[in-house]
Image (cartoon, rainbow, N blue to C red):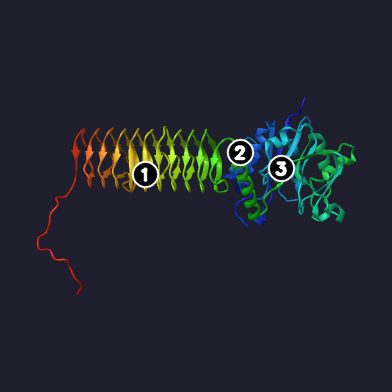
Amino acid sequence: MSHPLHVVILAAGAGTRMRSAKLKVLHEVAGLAMVDHVLSLAKQLKPAQITVVFGHQGDQLIQHLQHEQVNWAEQQQQLGTGHAVRQATPFFRDDEDVLVLYGDAPLVMPEDLSAITASQFVLTATLGDPTGYGRIIRDGAHIEAIVEQKDASTEQLAIKEINSGIIQAPAAKLDQWLARLSNNNQQAEYYLTDVIGLAAEDGTPFEAVQLADANAVKGANDMAQLAELEDLMQQRIREQLMRQGVRLLKPHSVDVRGQLDCGQDVVIDKGVLLEGKVTLGDNVRVGAYSVLKNCRLAAGTVVEPHTMLDGVTTTGACSMGPFARLRPGTQLAAGCKIGNFVETKKARLGQNSKASHLSYLGDAEIGEGVNMGAGTITCNYDGVNKFTTTIGDGAFIGSDSQLVAPVTIGKNATIGAGSTITRDTPDNQLTLSRSRQKTVDNWQKPGKR
């Protein structure tokens, strides 16, 4: 019977090479903080408990993870990875296996760990250029030692198999080995890797388990490495999407920064950015250079090129764009059309309603079959408060109209072009507000003096 799992996430590093006021593990990869990726991995392993080791700028980390059920262990002095894990030992239980993960290594996947049957192992990888990594000194499947780059001999530096830093061991044994660590090395630090040598001395060596994807060991110590992680993560996401049947017309140009769920026969054109939680139904098409954030688009919806959607929901097939901006709270029913240079905010449009061009619809309740003429504005803000414009089914709003909220336009009402409407209008009638047109006789166009 397997032992309960205790995951320890190391997130105490100062990250000085990032040259940022933000804690290193809070920098984002694919729209999520690196530590969020690692915490998600930990949760998928269904551990009995999770302990996060914090230190430098720890208040940022505690604030970021304030709603998570984790133990907090503080590393007040940065004395190495072994010292960091030792801060978590008060939470250890003797019947647990302890898995150590790193808050700046977001590429490890659940499948990298879930198939491992050993309770005591080190994740390793083989790299063409292992510079900077600790080398694995093997005895068959077991590890005799891990030698850090600065402490390695010329012969050891030639070894291509490297340490990922991720280890698992029984809690009671790990606690004992951590207590025996020495800082007699080039860095004067307590290396977690020295635990492997102590285990070999005790006749209970760690197993070496090689990662299928060597890139999974990579972390980020500076912005260049962070960019590399972003590229690797995006490549992984794109490949997963295409294997699921999503058509990416120019895969390398599409970025997903969050969670994307797609139905069948979804097509995404070049240069598209998807942020937050985005759900695309069957046969959705997203045009080139569009941005979608926290959207839920029903089957058959078409997003034309250069369209920005934020917090938009469609409940049936409709079209948006090109060059449209739809802001949070926008809801479109089947058959709706939002055309070029139209902006919406907290606007709900019923079936087959249209705003084809050059309009602003804010805080609006728009019925079915409504036509919004070009240049129409719902004047929803008086400088302090927001008000709602309500437009009944079948209404026709003439071009260049201003609807000054709060106001209600009746069902099947017609608003004459160029009107400023400040009072409710009746059903089935024409309402307009214009000054009388006149022509001035004998008017002379001014000339230069």
Q: Please, what secondary structure does the residue beneath circle 3 have?
A: loop
Q: Which residue is disc 1 drawn over?
A: 339
The amino acid type of the residue labelled 1 equals Gly
Q: Nearer the viewer, residue 26 or 328?
A: 328
In the picture, which quadrant includes the N terminus?
top right
Mark with earlier residue (3, 2): 3
Label 1 neighbour load within 10 Å: few <14, some 14-19, many 20+ = many
- Alpha-carbon distance for marks 3 and 2? 15 Å
Tag 3 or tag 1, which sits nearer the N-term?
A: 3
163 with respect to 39 (left or right): right
Residue matched to label 2: 240
Residue at numbered disc 3: 213
The earlier-in-sequence mark between 1 and 2 is 2
User: Residue at position x 52%, y 41% from top?
Assistant: 276
Residue occupying the point 86% across, 40% down: 199
Quarter location, residue 186: bottom right
Identify the residue shown where x is 90% and y is 37%: 203
| Residue nearer the viewer, 93 or 239 | 239
The answer to whether residue 232 is left or right of residue 4 is left
Name the secondary structure under disc 2: helix
